Amino acid sequence: MNPLQLLLMMAVLGAGFLLILIFFGTEIWGRVFLFQRKRRLVKLARYNPRNIWRRARKKSVFVVTLTTVRDFVLTLQLSLSLAETLAGALNQAALQFGGRGDFGQRLTTRVRSQLQVEPERVIEALAIDFNDEHLGELAERLEMAHEGGLSYAEAVNLTLDDIEEEIRVQVEKEIERAPVMLTIPMIIGVFFSALALLGFPLLVVMFTTVGQTTQ
C-alpha cells in the first residue's frame, strides 16, 4: 500500500468520523435541549408580559416548581379532610411552608395580609405572584365553592388530580427518553474505540512507509 492510498484511506475515515460526529452531536445536543426545557421555560417566564410589567413596577418575579404546588395543594387537602376550614388549612400550610423559599415567604405574607378578608384571595394572590396556572385554577374553583357550586374539598381534589396527572406525564416522558439518552453515549463510545483500534495501525503503517520512502 503506497502513501497516497494510505492518505486517501485516512481522508475517508476522517470524513466518516466527521459526519458521524456531526450527526450524533446534533442528536445529543437536541436531547440536552429537551432535558433543559423546564429550566428554559422558567427563565422565559421572566419575559412574560405580566412579569415584565411587574419588573417595570419594581415588583419581584417569583418562580415555583410543580412539586411545591403539589405539596401545597396536598397540605390543603389533608387539612380540609380533618374538618378544617379553608382559613385553618391556609394557616397550617403557612406554618409548614414558612421556610420553603420564595413560595413560603409569599404564602406567609399573603396569609397575614389577606386571610382575614377572604381566604380565597390568598390563593388568587399566590397565582398572580407566581403566574402559575394550577394555582389560578384552584383560585377559580375555590371561588365557585364560595358561591356554592361545589365544596372546598372537591375544588382542592380536582386541582390535585390535575397536578398529579401532569407530573405523571412528565415522568413517563423522561422514562421514554432515558433509553435514547443512554444509547447515544454507548454508540459513540464504541465508535471511538473502534476508530482508535483501526486508525492507530494505519497511522503507524503510513508513517513507517513515508519514512522508508524518504530514506
Image (cartoon, rainbow, N blue to C red):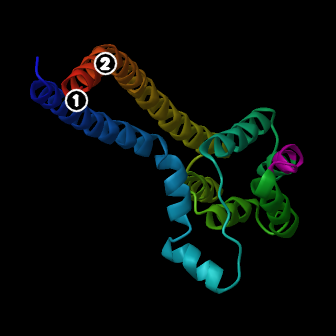
Above or below: residue 93 compared with residue 103: above
Whole-number angstrom distance, CA of label 1 to CA of label 2: 15 Å
Give the magenta range.
Answer: 92-100
Residue type highlighted by circle 1: Thr
Q: Residues within 10 Å of mark 1 (few under 14, many from 20)?
A: few
- Where is residue 210? Give x, y as percent: 22, 26
Residue that label 2 marks: 204
- Where is residue 204? Give x, y as percent: 31, 18
Question: Which of the numbered marks, if any, corresponds to residue 84?
Answer: none
The residue lying at 46 percent from left, 48 percent from top is 37
The answer to whether residue 141 of the structure is visible from this angle is yes
The residue lying at 64 percent from left, 62 percent from top is 130
The residue lying at 74 percent from left, 62 percent from top is 122
Residue type highlighted by circle 2: Val
The magenta stretch spans residue 94: yes
Residue that label 1 marks: 214
Depth order, front residue of 64/134? 64
Above or below: residue 87 compared with residue 125: above
* Quarter that holds the C terminus: top left
Above or below: residue 6 compared with residue 58: above
Q: Residues within 10 Å of mark 2 (few under 14, many from 20)?
A: few
List the single residue furthest toward the front.
215
The magenta stretch spans residue 211: no
Depth order, front residue of 201/143? 201
The residue lying at 55 percent from left, 40 percent from top is 163
* Quarter that holds the N terminus: top left
